[in-house]
Image (spheres, helix red, strand yellow):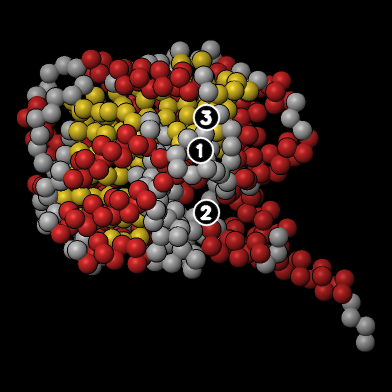
Amino acid sequence: MTINWYLIFEIIVFINAALAFITVFREKRDIAATWAWLIVLVFVPVVGFLAYAFIGRKLPRRQIYRVKNQVRMQLDKRVMQQRTQIGFDHLPADDVTEETSSLVSLFVRTDHAFLSRKNRVKIFIDGNSLFHRMIQDIEAAQSSIHIEFYTFYNDKIGNEILDLLIKKAQSGVEVRVIYDSWGSMGTWRSFFKPLMAAGGHVEPFLATHSALLDFRLNFRDHRKIVVVDGKIGYVGGFNIGDQYLGRKEKFGNWRDTHLRIVGSGVFGLQARFILDWNVTDKHHPIPTDYVEPKYFPLTKIKGETNLQIVSSGPDSDLQQIKMGYIRLIQTAQKRLWIQSPYLIPDDSVFDALRIASMAGVDVRIMIPNMPDHPFVYRATQYYARLLANDGIKIYFYGNGFLHAKTMVVDSKIASVGSANLDYRSFKLNFEINAFLYDAKLAKELEDIFENDVTSSELMTPEKFAAQSLYLKFKQDASRLLSPIL
């Protein structure tokens, strides 16, 4: 009896294709991601299904948490008390807020992000100065230290901060740490055992104790939050690791942007941490029926910055930060300057950028000139090429690796945080950004951008056209997978 191998092959291909369609269409997702996964599942049998098992499935509903009303009520109460204490007198930034009231309303409605007034905000673009100040604040902590990072490496700076946290925990300060097991790959749970022995609490986000066996690899905690005594907060793009201080030869100088916030804006960071902590560690939760005043202490800070702390993630279908980015783009009348290590916008953001440019707005986007993830970088180059053809100025940053996630509009409004301009940050990662209504800070970020331009190459349409056919092929191929990168 002769075995008809051709028939067997046809049957396998048919079954694989049928399973691919069933697998992808049984979960609600946007059409771009649907077709991207179909390509993977149909043309890469078996391996494609393994990839889907780890990074393709949506977060199970039982794992999706909802905002607890008790935390929000406590937060609202403390915010109103804070406002009463510092007063409601007029600030220059309030003029900007009136111009962009729709943006403020958007975040209030979609993320319950209150407008925090009169904060003191400092911008950091160098890891050495950032961690120096952060360590000073942690050393001075009296009641609580809450830390949440995508990356917490077992290296020189990681051990320095860990030793300090151990010391503070031994002195009676409440220390809680959330880290992402995938982003902190190579840092085993045993690394944190001395801190736990000292009375601190440490957990991987969503109780993911094994990154290798985690079937939710696509859903990462990309947030970077530090809150000290409920009074001082940090948010931005830096993680904890030597490479973020320029100590890794592969990346060289690390160019990032981070914020230090003092004032009621810290309440938004604290509330987000409490919510993340309680879904992560169910054995040592922070009570939400009554949030202790130490977590939201009243201060008499009178700064100049109004801001909103906005978070987003796969626990919501609203994509709050992406909507904020789109609204900022729509608001721009003269200038729109963006820095992002990854430029893989979905259709809505892509069209908003093109419309702004064609309407006469000076749109500039700065990205790295080196990859940290090959496919992601080639897809970034693809979209950069398209946008350059539409008149947008694309800069390749050349002094090390650019990891900043910033957007500045008309020297008036800005966003700094953890969210990149890509599908992953919009839909898959848990992110957090500060949206700043302060002309002085916006101008400072523009000055930083202009200084970075001196270390960058302007990529004109002619330069993109001169790239090799092989490079363009890699860019085009990577773009097909952009919805799932």
The residue wearing badge 3 is: 399
Q: Is mark 3 on a helix, strand or loop?
A: loop
The residue wearing badge 1 is: 252
**Residue 404: which numbered mark, if any?**
none
Contact (Cβ within 8 Å) of mark 3 with mark 1: yes
User: From this viewpoint, which residue is outermost toward the bottom?
Assistant: 1
The residue wearing badge 2 is: 28
Q: Residue at x 12, y 56 (%)?
A: 171
- Residue 478 lies, in percent from the top left, at 66, 44
Circle 2 residues within 10 Å: few <14, some 14–19, many ≥20 = few
Contact (Cβ within 8 Å) of mark 2 with mark 3: no
- Residue 372 lies, in percent from the top left, at 56, 44
- Cα–Cα span, label 3 and label 1: 8 Å
- Cα–Cα span, label 2 and label 3: 42 Å
Q: Label 2 is placed on what type of residue?
A: Lys
In the image, which is nearer the foreground, mark 2 or mark 3? 3
